Image (cartoon, helix red, strand yellow):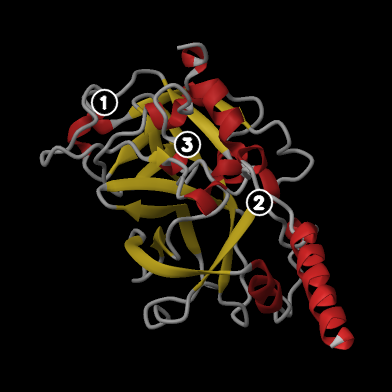
């Protein structure tokens, strides 16, 4: 009998001790970092009207994939670009550098033309360039900061196509993409003694690890990528479009796009062409990494709006 009483008392004490060890949860312990625990979903792209980035404030709700070429009257080649406002384009800086001799001002010989030339009204479709802004780190790390903002002498008068879509692309502001599918517009030499052909590629993105493994297959050194693949870069792999032309052949790759609904975003800018046919990847720099610098040049007066 005494043993039974002892066991009952011991059991009660054990339950009490166990209850005492539990931590009581109260409202002060809400996790403000992991808000999804409480069904509070963050707004897409931080899309609160009072906190929108300038690039997102100027983003058209409906736009289209729109290839643009930058030419020089003194050089026999062109550079790819994309409209990010009515008077500004985003372009690969290294391409522009080889087009522009250091002594010449771009307005004397460089101009932009688009496939649908009806948006231009001067000099048979030409819009001359007034200034080129190169990324401040371009000289030190060219491939990793291969981006430039091209300002036109006169903005385009009409940014909408006949079907009401804007030719101005939006700029993606987040490090992570919302889709694994991206689109690459590129010009390439297809038929002899003819101008470059154009095509859109629907490509999958791959991880940085996969990208490094693919680049390790290269038998040729790529000196421009001396730091390897860094965190602000993304890679795409071509494994189904090789019937016309391979990645290693001469091409002019434009910006990398992602579409969400009716909205087209620029997500990447090209780094350097890898001319080794053992490698079927292309490396891009994420636009989100350069966004502060881009906004300060393209929309400087909107900082406090």
| Structural crowding at the residue carrying mark 1, measured as other residues with C-alpha within 10 Å and reported as few (<14), some (14–19) or many (≥20) | few
Choose top left, top right, bottom left or bottom right for residue 12. bottom right
The span from disc 3 to disc 2 (Cα, nearest Å) is 20 Å
Q: Which residue is mark 1?
A: 123
Residue 225: tell me if it is visible.
Answer: yes
Q: In this rendering, is residue 276 above or below 229?
A: below
**Cβ–Cβ below 8 Å for labels 1 and 2?**
no
Residues at marks 1 and 3, CA–CA distance in whole angstroms: 42 Å
Label located before the other in sequence (1 or 3): 3
Q: Is residue 54 left or right of residue 11?
A: left
Q: Please name the residue shown 23% across and 21% down the image.
A: 157
Are the residues at dot 1 and dot 3 in contact (C-beta closer than 8 Å)? no
**Helix, strand, or loop for circle 2?**
loop
Earlier-in-chain disc, 3 versus 2: 3
Q: Residue furthest front?
A: 1
Location of mark 3 (residue): 46
Crowd class of label 3 (few under 14; some 14 to 19; many from 20; radius 10 Å): some
- Residue 109 percent across, percent down from the top left: 46, 28
Local crowd size for mark 2, using a 10 Å CA cut-off: few (<14), some (14–19), many (≥20): some
Quarter the N terminus occupies: bottom right
Q: How far across and how far down the image is residue 82, in percent?
A: 40, 41
Please tell me whether residue 153 is drawn above or below residue 120 in the rendered image. Answer: above
Q: Nearer the viewer, mark 1 or mark 3?
A: 3
The residue at which mark 2 appears reads as: 232
């Amino acid at each position: 009998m005494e043993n039974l009483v002892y066991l009952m008392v011991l059991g009660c004490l054990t339950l009490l001790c166990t209850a005492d060890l539990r931590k009581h949860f109260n409202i002060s312990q809400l996790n403000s970092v992991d808000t999804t625990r409480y069904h509070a979903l963050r707004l897409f792209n931080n899309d609160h009207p009072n906190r929108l980035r300038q690039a997102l404030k100027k983003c058209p709700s409906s736009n289209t994939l729109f290839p643009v070429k930058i030419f020089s009257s003194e050089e026999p080649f062109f550079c790819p670009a994309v409209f990010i406002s009515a008077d500004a384009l985003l372009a690969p800086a290294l391409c522009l550098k080889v087009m522009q001799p250091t002594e010449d001002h771009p307005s004397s010989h460089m101009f932009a033309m688009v496939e649908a030339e009806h948006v231009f009204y001067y000099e048979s479709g030409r819009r001359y360039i007034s200034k080129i802004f190169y990324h401040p780190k371009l000289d030190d790390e060219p491939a990793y900061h291969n981006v430039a903002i091209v300002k036109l002498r006169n903005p385009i008068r009409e940014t909408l196509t006949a079907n009401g879509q804007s030719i101005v692309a939006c700029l993606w502001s987040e490090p992570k993409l919302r889709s694994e599918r991206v689109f690459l517009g590129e010009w390439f030499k297809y038929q002899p003694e003819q101008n470059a052909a154009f095509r859109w590629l629907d490509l999958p993105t791959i991880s940085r690890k996969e990208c490094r493994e693919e680049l390790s297959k290269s038998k040729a050194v790529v000196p421009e990528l001396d730091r390897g693949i860094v965190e602000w870069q993304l890679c795409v792999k071509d494994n189904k479009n090789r019937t016309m032309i391979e990645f290693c052949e001469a091409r002019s790759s434009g910006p990398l796009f992602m579409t969400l609904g009716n909205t087209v975003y620029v997500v990447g800018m090209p780094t350097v062409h890898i001319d080794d046919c053992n490698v079927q990847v292309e490396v891009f720099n994420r636009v989100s990494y350069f966004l502060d610098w881009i906004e300060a040049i393209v929309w400087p007066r909107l900082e406090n709006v």
